[in-house]
């Protein structure tokens, strides 16, 4: 099980849009926002993130091996939605990302509010019926 703070960090990256607290710049592939510095520092040490800037108040980071992370996160969401178990994580390029997506889907599904209008990588958008790709 992934801790709430860790899941929140990576989900904030996957849900980043121009209208959210975390912004993703498609040209530079950088994420900027206000993150839990202890969690960011831990994942920088582990090599999952790279610090770009931390001077202006907001922190700017890169997600290392981003394509593998996105693919595995979306696979976790998909398998959770299909009712599969987490054993499929072993077949992904990034088992951690799979688990974050898997657990995030289950966490969101527990909430009483519907997913109407929710935009996150790997989740189906209700306005288009397509899976959102970041």
Image (tube, rainbow, N blue to C red):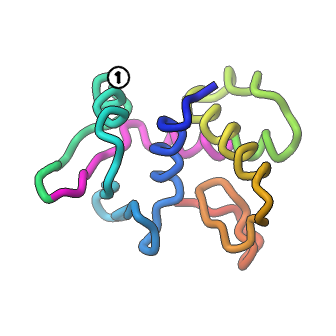
Find residue 56 and report its horizontal and vertical position in percent. Answer: 14, 59
The answer to which of 91 and 35 lies nearer the viewer is: 35
Find residue 32 and report its horizontal and vertical position in percent. Answer: 30, 57
The image quarter in which residue 116 lies? bottom right
Binning the other alpha carbons within 10 Å of mark 1 as few (below 14), some (14 to 19) or many (20 upward) gives few
Q: Is residue 64 left or right of residue 60?
A: right
The image quarter in which residue 65 lies? top left
* Residue at the farthest front position: 112
* Element at label 1: loop
Question: What residue lies at 53% left-to-right and 48% top-to-bottom?
Answer: 11
User: Is residue 55 magenta-colored?
Assistant: no
* Residue at the farthest right position: 83
The image quarter in which residue 95 lies? top right
Question: What residue lies at 42% left-to-right and 73% top-to-bottom?
Answer: 18
* Residue at the farthest left position: 55
Find residue 53 and report its horizontal and vertical position in percent. Answer: 16, 49
Question: What residue lies at 85% left-to-right and 34% top-to-bottom?
Answer: 84
Residue wearing tag 1: 46
Q: Which residues are magenta?
A: 57-75
């Amino acid at each position: 099980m992934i801790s709430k703070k860790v899941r929140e960090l990576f989900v904030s990256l996957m849900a980043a849009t121009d209208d959210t607290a975390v912004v993703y710049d498609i040209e530079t592939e950088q994420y900027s926002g206000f993150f839990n510095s202890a969690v960011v520092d831990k994942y920088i040490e582990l090599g999952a993130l790279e610090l770009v800037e931390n001077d202006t108040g907001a922190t700017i980071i890169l997600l290392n091996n981003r394509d593998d992370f996105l693919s595995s996160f979306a696979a976790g969401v998909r398998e959770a939605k299909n009712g599969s178990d987490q054993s499929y994580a072993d077949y992904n390029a990034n088992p951690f990302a799979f688990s974050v997506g898997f657990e995030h889907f289950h966490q969101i599904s527990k909430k009483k509010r519907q997913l109407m209008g929710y935009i996150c990588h790997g989740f189906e958008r209700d306005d288009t019926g397509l899976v959102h790709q970041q």
